[in-house]
């Protein structure tokens, strides 16, 4: 395995992520931020954060598949969203796609907007593989 995930008992609970990801592989793969866009560049999910998060994760999963990466190899996830306090909704949508993989280290960043009007979320991640 290319990662060891930890959440020390001395830190607050980590809902939907781990505090530490120790990468032990030899190759890092960085995935660009993915948004809720279809192949024709149309926004998916209208103003629904859950649907947009699912669509962004599906796009990320497609990029990961092209690189031969699984969710268990992701060591870092960064989420940019206009609704950062809705982390429970974001986490539910992520878990709907990750197939029970343990969550990596993660940061959710509140932003005022994204490059595509109407976008509520963009997700990027980093994998480490052997």
Image (cartoon, helix red, strand yellow):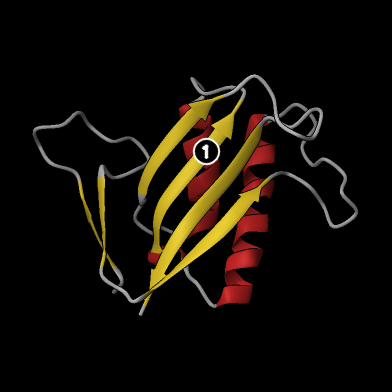
Choose top left, top right, bottom left or bottom right for residue 119.
top right
* Farthest left residue in view: 10
At horizontal 31% and vertical 74% (from top left) the residue drawn is 25
Instruction: Return the residue nearer the eye: 53 or 82.
Output: 82
- What residue is at 82 percent from the left and 29 percent from the top? 117
Q: Residue at x 28, y 36 (%)?
A: 14
Q: Is residue 59 left or right of residue 39?
A: left
- Vertical position of residue 76 compared to residue 11: above or below: below
Q: Is residue 90 above or below residue 29?
A: above
* Mark 1, residue position: 79
Question: Secondary structure under badge 1?
Answer: strand
Q: Which residue is depicted at the point 44% across and 64% down? A: 127
Q: Where is residue 106 shown, x and y percent of the image? A: 39, 42
Q: In x, y percent, where is residue 52?
A: 69, 39
Q: Is residue 53 left or right of residue 114?
A: left
Look at the image and tell me in which quarter the C terminus lies. bottom left
- On the image, which quarter does residue 27 sit in? bottom left
The one nearer the camera, 95 or 61, is 61
- The number of callouts visible is 1
Q: How far across and how far down the image is residue 123, in percent?
A: 57, 44
Q: Residues within 10 Å of mark 1 (few under 14, many from 20)?
A: many
- 40 over 66 or under it: above or below: above
Residue 48: give x, y in percent of width and height.
Answer: 71, 29
Which of the two residues, 97 or 33, is positioned nearer the viewer here?
A: 33
Compare residues 118 and 32 and report the one nearer the observer: 32
The N terminus lies in quadrant: bottom left
């Amino acid at each position: 395995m290319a990662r060891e995930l930890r959440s020390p008992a001395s830190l607050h609970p980590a809902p939907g992520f781990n505090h530490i990801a120790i990468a032990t592989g030899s190759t890092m793969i960085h995935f660009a931020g993915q948004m809720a866009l279809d192949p024709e560049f149309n926004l998916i999910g209208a103003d629904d954060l859950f649907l947009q998060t699912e669509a962004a994760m599906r796009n990320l999963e497609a990029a990961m598949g092209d690189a031969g990466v699984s969710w268990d190899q992701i060591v870092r996830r960064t989420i940019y969203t206009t609704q950062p306090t809705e982390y429970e909704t974001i986490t539910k949508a992520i878990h709907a796609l990750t197939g029970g993989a343990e969550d990596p280290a993660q940061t959710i960043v509140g932003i005022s907007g994204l490059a595509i009007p109407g976008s509520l979320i963009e997700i990027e991640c980093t994998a480490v593989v052997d």
